[in-house]
Image (spheres, rainbow, N blue to C red):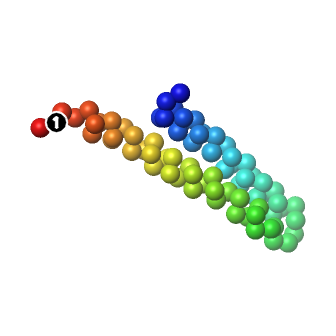
């Protein structure tokens, strides 16, 4: 598997992990009347940051391939 496919696949799995952590956050807030612990509250942030950087790479990928395939002057 090459680098682009690996990044694309990890981006998809990170979105699943992010969704699950957000759902767990809402469930924890609905079940417990008090404020949930900080590790539950901030658990969506690490996959979100990783998804941000992989998304930037995937966004720039078509532009980088056009830039690389352009003939040199």
**Outermost front residue:** 2
Image quarter hosting the C terminus: top left
Between 24 and 66, which is closer to the camera in this rendering? 66
What residue is rendered at 33% in x and 36% in y? 65
Relative horizontal placement of residue 15, taking residue 73 as reference (left or right): right
Marker count (numbered): 1
Query: Compared with residue 29, is residue 20 higher up or lower down, i.e. above or below?
Result: above
Relative horizontal placement of residue 39, taking residue 2 as reference (left or right): right
Relative horizontal placement of residue 65, taking residue 72 as reference (left or right): right
Q: Secondary structure at mark 1?
A: loop
Query: Compared with residue 53, is residue 2 higher up or lower down, i.e. above or below?
Result: above
**Outermost right residue:** 32
Q: Residues within 10 Å of mark 1 (few under 14, many from 20)?
A: few
What residue is rendered at 57% in x and 51% in y? 50
Quadrant hosting residue 15? top right
Q: Locate residue 3, reporting x and y percent.
A: 48, 35
Query: Compared with residue 46, is residue 14 higher up or lower down, i.e. above or below?
Result: above
Q: Which residue is mark 1?
A: 72
**Outermost bottom residue:** 34
Q: Locate residue 66, reporting x and y percent.
A: 29, 36
**Outermost top residue:** 1
What residue is rendered at 57% in x and 56% in y? 49
What residue is rendered at 16% in x and 36% in y? 72
């Amino acid at each position: 598997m090459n680098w682009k496919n690996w990044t694309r696949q990890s981006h998809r799995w990170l979105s699943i992990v992010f969704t699950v952590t957000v759902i767990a956050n809402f469930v924890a807030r609905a079940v417990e009347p008090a404020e949930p612990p900080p590790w539950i509250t901030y658990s969506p942030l690490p996959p979100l940051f990783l998804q941000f950087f992989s998304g930037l790479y995937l966004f720039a990928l078509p532009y980088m391939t056009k830039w690389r395939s352009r003939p040199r002057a």
